[in-house]
Amino acid sequence: MQDKTSLAGRVIMITGAGQGIGRALAECAAGKGARVALVDINQQLLSETVELIGEERARAYVGDISDDVFVGNTVNNIVDDFGDLHGLINNAGIVRAAMVHKMTLAQWQQVIDVNLTGAFICLQAVGKYLIHKANSGDPNPGSIVNVSSDAGRRGTVGQINYGAAKSGVLGLTMSAAREWGVYNINVNSVCFGMVETAMTETVRQEKFREKYLQQIPLGRFSTPDDVAPATCMLLSDMANYITGQHLSISGGFHIGA
């Protein structure tokens, strides 16, 4: 019986692939048979991810996803290097924490530039290529998964910039799904809760730990390996009739319509 979760023969672009969730996504996609084009601003960390997966399946593209010229050139380079592109996991993100009344405009803008504008730039660049494939006769040009957050669905303390950006990513997902359905391009988002990465280290400290754990029905923080498989599933044939949806992979941190 055919494995509908397989990504064999596909080329997947993954942003923020140098560490944490991005690295787990890269390993998961490669483990399902994909070749992976890995993007990150940190060359050393990105090289480590490529080494883990192997140069026969992974290549590194170092740069800033909020730079539209870099992203456009990168998509072209991926197609030249691999021969095609079938999917994007729009994962790159940063945090600049501060309470609302103390947040500087620079802290606000840095997070919006990467987490929202950068996500749009990558979505647009990959979408243009997938539309070209569709217009050239490809009936299944590809899929996009945007990484949002439960913070974008329920709010967050000390990170209004992050919550606003991740809410915006949900809007990117729904609008692109409506526009691109005619091309059979699937666009979905995933919403993680509290994943054990460097970005959540502060809120997982003893001072806040129990408060957050009490809000998670499964009673534990997730790991990057917990969230990667379901994310990759949305790029596979398993999800070929799913678009415009937001999948929370958070142990029940968010439960609702």
Image: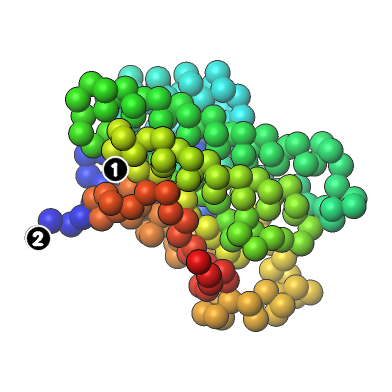
Considering only vertical position in the picture, is 254 above or below 48? below
Considering only vertical position in the picture, is 103 above or below 114? below
Q: Residue at 61%, 29% (x, y): give it.
A: 66
Residue 151 visible in the snapshot: yes
Q: Observer-nearest residue: 246 or 146?
A: 246
Q: What mark, if any, has residue 34 been given in the picture? A: 1
Q: Is residue 6 left or right of residue 62?
A: left
- Residue 13 lies, in percent from the top left, at 41, 36
Q: Residue at 62%, 41% (x, y): give it.
A: 115
Q: Observer-nearest residue: 28 or 176?
A: 176
Q: Secondary structure at mark 1?
A: loop
Type of amino acid under label 1: Ala
Q: Secondary structure at mark 2?
A: loop
- Residue 3 lies, in percent from the top left, at 18, 57
Considering only vertical position in the picture, is 106 above or below 84? below
Disc on the earlier residue, 2 or 1: 2
Q: Which residue is mark 2?
A: 1
Nearer to us: label 2 or label 1: 2
Q: Residue extending furthest right?
A: 102
